[in-house]
Amino acid sequence: MPEVDYYEVLGVRRNATAADVKTAYRRLAKTMHPDGGGTVGTFRLLREAYDVLSDPAARARYDAGGATVVPVPVRPRPRRRFGDEPGFVPGLPDLDAEELTWWHFAGEDTRTRYDRGPGHTPVVAAVAGMVLVLLPLVTGVGFSPPVLIVWLLLTAGTALLVQRLARGYLRAARAREAYAREFGGHTVFGAPGTERDELAERLTAELLEEYLTRLPGARIFHGLAWPGSVFADVDHAVLCGKRLVLIESKLWLPGHYETAEDGRLLRNGRPFRGGGSRLEESLAAYHDLLPEVALRGAMIVYPSRSGDLTTADPDDLPVAPMTPEEFLHEIGGWLAADPSTVDHELLRTVRDQVVGGGGRAA
């Protein structure tokens, strides 16, 4: 077996910064993790190298003792998965917009939670107060002492209301400027994987950006970590208003998929062992992170070879396999409950979970 040191494991120089070490670890972790096609031994070594080199004290002790040589298990050559059809690429749905009940929301304007001023009611009250204040001056009506006192109180109240309105509109303008500086026109954050075995992720990215960006408030994310993790634990997510859907992309054999009452995934009525899901864990992690947000999970399933692939009605299950068409109908309609609102704080929280960050306009 070849032997390398921790720097070689991560592929960084000995003078690499902490940021370099973290970037290298994140880049390698996705492909070396057992769920990504790596081995337990290789990933354990990667994690060990990162733990040492990311800790200044541990790194100093490691460097002082010389490059301790550690064995690296030889990673087996990847084999073609059973059922793969070389050259086969599943197609995306070509839906008529009229088939989607939520499509008409595309014409609405986007609203951010913090870009609205005090509203119409205070303005109407302020205008009415100003009219009452100015009316005696315009008509030349004399003031008796009681009327003068009432007029002075009304004048002071109107002036205070106008001042508060001005401050409210100024705060709203500043909030809009801050939002624009931080997020610009970005509606998509992160990017799907580029490896051969990440084809399903790229298909879903195209699906989301082609259809769900029609919802003015929808924001799309690719490659999110669980809180406290550095891995891309969630393939995709879409946030719209206070609703968030977490998505896994799967490339599975043709057949009929459904979720049993006990939560098991079935294919053609039998327990399916050809692929796993971590959506339930993801939903639990994001429920703790965003307790005020309504959450759903979806597995978008594509056929790995020629043949029909169908899924059962999701029936409002928190985690359910769906074809791309069913996803657009079911989840698109669910997200469209509040199609135009973008919550500044929620957007920032979810955006910060994207591995590698980055945003772009769709």
Image: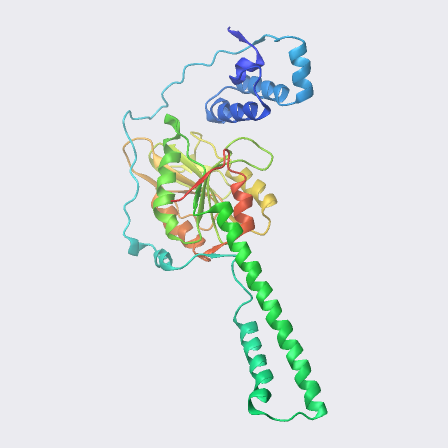
Query: Coloring scheme of the render?
Result: rainbow
Foreground pick, 288 / 179: 179
Horizontal and vertical percent position of residue 189: 45, 40
Residue at image coords 35%, 32%: 253
| Relative depth, front residue between 320 and 355 | 355
Can the viewer see residue 114?
Answer: no
- The image shows a total of numbered marks equal to 0
**Residue visible at 63% across and 19% down?**
52
Identity of the residue drawn at 51% across and 55% down: 176
> Can you give x and y, in whole percent of width and height, for residue 299 in the image?
43, 40
Compared with residue 360, is residue 115 higher up or lower down, i.e. above or below?
A: below
Q: Residue at x 44, y 53 (%)?
A: 217
The answer to whether any part of residue 22 appears in the image is: yes
Give coordinates of residue 116: x percent, y percent.
Answer: 52, 61
On screen, residue 103 above or below 299: below
Residue 133's spot in the image, x, y percent?
Answer: 60, 83
Quadrant of image for the C terminus: top left
In this rendering, position of residue 161 left or right of residue 34: right
Locate residue 137 relative to residue 193 in the image: left or right.
Answer: right
Q: Nearer the viewer, residue 88 or 136?
A: 136
**Above or below, comparing residue 291 to residue 68 in the picture:** below
Task: Find residue 254 and report its image quarter.
Answer: top left
The residue closer to the viewer here, 103 or 328, is 103
Q: Give residue 226's quadrant in the image.
A: top right
